[in-house]
Amino acid sequence: MDLFLLRKFGGFTLADEKRPEIKREPEYTIKFIPPQGGDVKNIHLSAQALKIGAVSLAAGALLFVGAFSYAVYSTFAVRSGASEVRELREVNKIQQEQLLNLSKKANALQEQMDQLRQIENDLRRMSGAAPAKDSDAQAPSSPAADGNGGDGTHDGQGGPIVQPDFNNVGQVLDLVEQGLAVRRQSLLELKQQLQARQDMMGTSSLNDLGMPGGTVPAIWPARGDVSSPYGLRWNGSDFHPGIDIANDMGTPIVATADGIVTTAGWNSGGYGNMVDIDHGNGIMTRYGHAMQVAVVAGQHVRRGQVIAYMGSTGFSTGPHVHYEVRINGTPVNPSTYLH
């Protein structure tokens, strides 16, 4: 039992009690003082609460700094990625434009190679030389030439739409390169053939070079003006297999080389009165639209001999002679044989 001692001093009573001392934690007071006066607000915080608050504030600050830093990094990373995407798109666009230009150049080269091959074929046909070795593989004939009933006027095209890329453009360029090598070799062979033929003609008798007699066509069939040359005419709508020499009605037409008359008379195919002469070695000459024929089939004629007289029979618009030179049945340019 606790013992209390009470003492009175001037009306006051003091009580003495023996109790254990309790250690109290320090407190901190935060005062909020309004600037214009008013009630002051106090917040009492213990040391432990203040420590917890400080730690929480520090942790929040760290979290905020981390989140802000991550947001800034993400923003710059996205901007950098978008910039790289734009740059890649620009590079890809430039590459596509370059590829398209390369594709156009490759296509132009391919067309030029085709034209060069056609020119060589024309030269071989006009000169009577053998066809190019690659003509069958690289320049297929038309359906009409194959006897399939085509007339050469159809131009249908089709197939899948495939955008050019570096692989297929490279393949086209490889084909052009290969075709160029083949074309060079083929032209060299043609040059050798023509050179050999020229040398052979150079060693022939003077009769074969335009003097009286000879089996190689070498003179003009008639005097006059060339009214229609060999080749395409009328804006490309007609191929003319010979040359037209126009003059007055009745102008003499002469044989351009020695030979045997194989045809002499009317031709219903548009030539009118026509004369064909076989000169041997696959060479034949034709003279059309004559007013009158002066020879008969089977007759041997000499170079310079009158065989007909100029007229306008058959498909003709006026007096002239249609003159052809054929090698193995194929018409060639007669200008090569005119001296």
Image: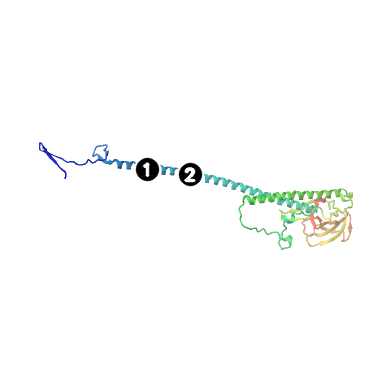
Q: Which residue is mark 1?
A: 59
Helix or strand or loop: what does disc 1 sit on? helix
- Badge 2 or badge 1: first in the primary sequence: 1
Q: Is residue 339 visible?
A: no
Q: In this image, 47 relative to 117: left or right? A: left
Helix or strand or loop: what does disc 2 sit on? helix
Q: Position of residue 152 (x, y in %)?
A: 70, 59
In this view, the residue in front, 127 or 269, is 127
Q: Position of residue 10 (x, y in %)?
A: 10, 36
Q: Position of residue 231 (x, y in %)?
A: 75, 53
Check disc 2 and give the amino acid type. Answer: Ala
Count of number-bearing discs: 2
Determine which quarter of the picture holds residue 58: top left
Q: Quadrant of the N terminus?
A: top left
Closer mark to the observer between disc 2 and disc 1: 1
Q: Disc 2 and disc 1: Cα gap in Å? A: 27 Å
* Residue located 73% across and 56% down the image: 137
Category of crowding for the residue at label 1, using alpha-carbon neighbours closer than 10 angstroms: few (below 14), some (14–19), many (at least 20) = few
In this view, the residue in front, 175 or 208, is 175
Q: In this image, 81 relative to 97: left or right? A: left
Q: Which mark is residue 77?
A: 2
Outermost residue to the left: 11
Residue 166 position (above or below residue 27): below
Q: In this image, 80 relative to 243: left or right? A: left
In this view, the residue in front, 278 or 88, is 88
